[in-house]
Image (tube, coloured by chain):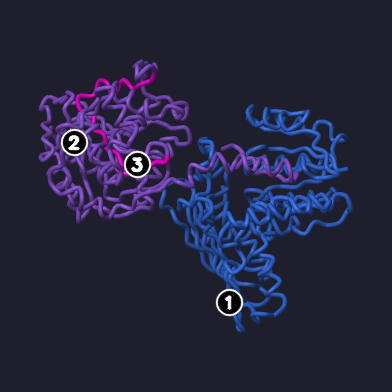
Chain colours: A blue, B purple
């Protein structure tokens, strides 16, 4: 049984909490959030110990094996540092931290502590992305020449089903570390590394349509260090997107063909949800394990990555996404910002 | 200047082929609608629609270029020294401090030398009204009650709950209390109620982009001195029978307006109506059902429901 503390109960943190609560061999010992409403919700879900200050979760480290951290970006470094120094394994929502310097310190702390540490590079676990990777690795499109990877969403402006204002820290570069490039681009840059290996930044252009202190769009060109393959990353917060439309796609252009993520993403997400739901009901009826969240398509990866992390905690194996992966993405983002004349806050 | 009464009034429809000529269009619209500015008016408050952080191209929020043209026309009529404020109130999910820069109003304020005001942070006074048997209380910005000229600049768009959202609904947005969703269980009554308290002297509708089933470039500017009359015509353009729009029916019942005497001048309603993409909310009303089905499924299958889907 992995005893876990869930720190940060915003949108992602609450999803991680309900996932943890459903997992066999995982016991949620405590949860923390500054919002009283979120804590009440955690209590109603069965979490006995709830704290307004996340430090309190880690005040009795012997009661825990791991923490799941989904705090605002500016609290990533200090919370991870405290957890690792308390001898806890850590699952951390992206970005790893706001600056390269903080990320390097985390890498060092992970090595020194010997704890399991994993950053939530969740897009790697999306079914369509796994299929693209399998297709590429099997040689189906030959050598990768160019990858176009894009996601345009509403970012912090996404209208929640229950109206709530966007938190101010998103638009404070000192707290958020950046805008759309750090928020959405983080995943897209990670995907290029996933497909093409480590890379360098060769071009960056930032968008400021919204006249905010952080960018609301970015186009970044990357080049693979090993193969020279180029990656064109196009991200933004500027579009009013609503379920079931999801403006994300990856196209891998090789010298023997191409693969497009849209071939693998269900065209009708409602129909897909009904089909997957029925499959799970059938699995339950015949006594098999269900595939949690498969009916949502886009949220199943959050279950899978957390499941994988806890498996590493139990087995003592290395997580598939390392601290160095998180560091490299932040190094690339910082390089892209520097190219546009922005220095780290 | 305050034209009140139970009879409706004329609403002008002006085609705007070139946004560079918006000032001319606003001026023409005001003349056609019979708006006469009080030469003594000194304090002017303009209330655009900034319901959320979605730009004017989406059809959701008032185009700052329309507000800019309104400012120019007002200065033309009242003199360049007239005190003009552009105000919007916070909403349940929207904060004006971010909406102003995101939607281009910071820039407008600089260019036009007008003040931007968060109406939720101005002095508010409580007003109670009866709509039918329901007593409704509102926290109303004093600034709007005291303004010599209150100009309402809504969008022309549809909304699931109310079918249309235009002149009267934009006045609802001026309520100072942030969590306006508390009114949603009786939204139509609340819309009528707030319009019994806050009475714009002039409404100029931004229909450059209209929002029906999807955004459409209508190139329309509407003007009128009576919110009810504007909404009556607006609902026709949005392809709803005005008598099927609940807040208009309540407004008639409460004697806030009277369809008799309402008419369009300038371009024809049909010209815009024919290109307006009528919205259908058939599936939308199933959102509650979807949530219930999801909960039932999760109980039977033992699956997880993402909390943000369960909240609906």
> Pointer 2: what residue?
B224
Closest to the observer, B10 or A251: B10
Say above or below: B85 vs A131: above
Dots 2, 3 in contact, CB < 8 A: no
Task: Specify few, some or many for label 2: CA neighbours under 10 Å numbering under 14, 14-19, or 20 or more.
Answer: many
Q: Is B28 on the left or on the right of A100, as rendered?
A: left
Say above or below: B291 vs B15: above
Instruction: Provide the major secondary structure of the magenta segment.
Output: strand
Q: Is B160 on the left or on the right of B270, as rendered?
A: right
Residue B106's mark? Answer: 3
> Pointer 1: what residue?
A253
| Mark 1 vs mark 3, CA separation in Å | 43 Å
In the image, what residue occupies the spot 62% across and 84% down? A256
Q: Is B301 on the left or on the right of B91, as rendered?
A: right
Residue A8: image x %, image y %? Answer: 68, 38
Between disc 1 and disc 2, the foreground one is 2
> What segment carries the magenta color?
B136-160
Marks 1 and 2 share the same chain: no
Residue B145 belongs to magenta span = yes
Residue B38's mark? Answer: none
Q: Chain of mark 2?
A: B
Task: Specify few, some or many for label 3: CA neighbours under 10 Å numbering under 14, 14-19, or 20 or more.
Answer: some
| Mark 2 vs mark 3, CA separation in Å | 27 Å
In the image, what residue occupies the spot 51% across and 36% down? A163
In the image, what residue occupies the spot 40% across and 29% down? B187
């Amino acid at each position: 049984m992995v005893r876990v503390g869930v720190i940060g109960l915003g949108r992602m943190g609450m999803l991680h909490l309900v996932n943890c609560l459903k997992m066999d061999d995982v016991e949620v010992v405590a949860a923390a959030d500054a919002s009283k409403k979120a804590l009440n919700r955690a209590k109603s879900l069965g979490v006995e110990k709830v704290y307004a200050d996340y430090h309190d979760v880690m005040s009795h480290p012997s009661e825990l094996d791991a923490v799941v951290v989904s705090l605002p970006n500016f609290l990533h470094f200090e919370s991870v540092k405290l957890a690792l120094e308390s001898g806890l394994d850590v699952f951390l929502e992206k970005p790893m931290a706001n600056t390269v310097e903080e990320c390097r310190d985390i890498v060092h702390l992970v090595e020194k502590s010997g704890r399991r540490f994993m950053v939530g590079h969740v897009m790697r676990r999306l079914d369509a992305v796994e299929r693209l990777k399998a297709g590429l690795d099997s040689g189906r499109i030959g050598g990768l020449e160019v990858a176009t990877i894009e996601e345009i969403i509403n970012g912090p402006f996404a209208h929640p089903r229950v109206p709530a204002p966007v938190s101010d820290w998103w638009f404070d570069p000192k707290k958020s570390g950046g805008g759309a490039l750090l928020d959405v681009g983080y995943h897209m840059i990670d995907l290029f590394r996933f497909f093409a290996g480590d890379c360098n930044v060769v071009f960056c252009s930032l968008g400021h349509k919204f006249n905010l202190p952080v960018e609301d769009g970015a186009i970044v060109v990357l080049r693979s260090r090993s193969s020279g393959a180029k990656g064109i990353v196009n991200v933004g917060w500027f579009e009013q997107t609503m379920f079931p439309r999801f403006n994300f796609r990856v196209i891998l252009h090789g010298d023997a063909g191409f693969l497009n993520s849209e071939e693998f993403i269900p065209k009708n997400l409602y129909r897909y949800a009904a089909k997957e739901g029925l499959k799970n009901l059938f699995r339950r009826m015949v006594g098999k394990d269900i595939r949690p969240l498969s009916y949502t398509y886009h949220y199943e990866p959050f279950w899978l990555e957390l499941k994988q992390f806890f498996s590493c905690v139990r087995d003592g194996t290395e997580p598939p996404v390392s601290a160095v992966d998180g560091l490299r993405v932040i190094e690339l983002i910082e390089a892209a910002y520097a190219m546009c004349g922005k220095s780290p806050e | 200047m305050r034209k009140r009464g139970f009879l409706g009034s004329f609403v002008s429809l002006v085609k705007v082929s070139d946004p560079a000529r918006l000032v001319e269009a606003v001026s023409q619209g005001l003349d056609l609608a019979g708006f006469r500015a009080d030469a003594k008016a000194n304090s002017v408050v303009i209330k655009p629609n900034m319901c959320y952080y979605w730009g004017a191209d989406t059809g959701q929020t008032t185009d700052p270029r329309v507000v800019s043209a309104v400012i120019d026309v007002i200065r033309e009529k009242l003199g360049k020294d007239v005190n003009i404020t552009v105000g919007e109130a916070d909403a349940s999910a929207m904060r004006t401090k971010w909406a102003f820069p995101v939607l281009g109003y910071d820039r407008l304020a600089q260019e036009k030398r007008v003040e931007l005001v968060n109406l939720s942070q101005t002095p508010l006074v409580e007003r109670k009204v009866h709509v039918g048997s329901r007593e409704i209380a509102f926290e109303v910005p004093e600034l709007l009650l005291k303004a010599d000229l209150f100009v309402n600049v809504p969008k022309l768009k549809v909304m699931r709950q109310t079918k249309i959202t235009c002149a009267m609904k934009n006045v609802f947005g001026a309520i100072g209390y942030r969590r306006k969703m508390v009114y949603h269980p009786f939204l139509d009554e609340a819309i009528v109620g707030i319009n019994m308290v806050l009475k714009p002297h002039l409404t100029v509708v931004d229909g450059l982009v209209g929002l029906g089933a999807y955004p459409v470039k209508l190139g329309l500017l509407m003007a009128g001195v009576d919110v009810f009359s504007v909404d009556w015509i607006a609902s026709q353009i949005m392809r709803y029978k005005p008598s099927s729009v609940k807040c208009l029916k309540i407004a008639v019942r409460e004697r806030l307006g009277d369809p008799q005497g309402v008419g369009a001048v300038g371009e024809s309603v049909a010209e815009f109506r024919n290109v307006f993409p009528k919205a259908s909310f058939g599936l939308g009303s199933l959102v509650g059902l979807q949530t219930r089905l999801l909960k039932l499924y999760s109980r039977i299958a033992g699956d997880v429901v993402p909390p943000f889907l369960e909240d609906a």
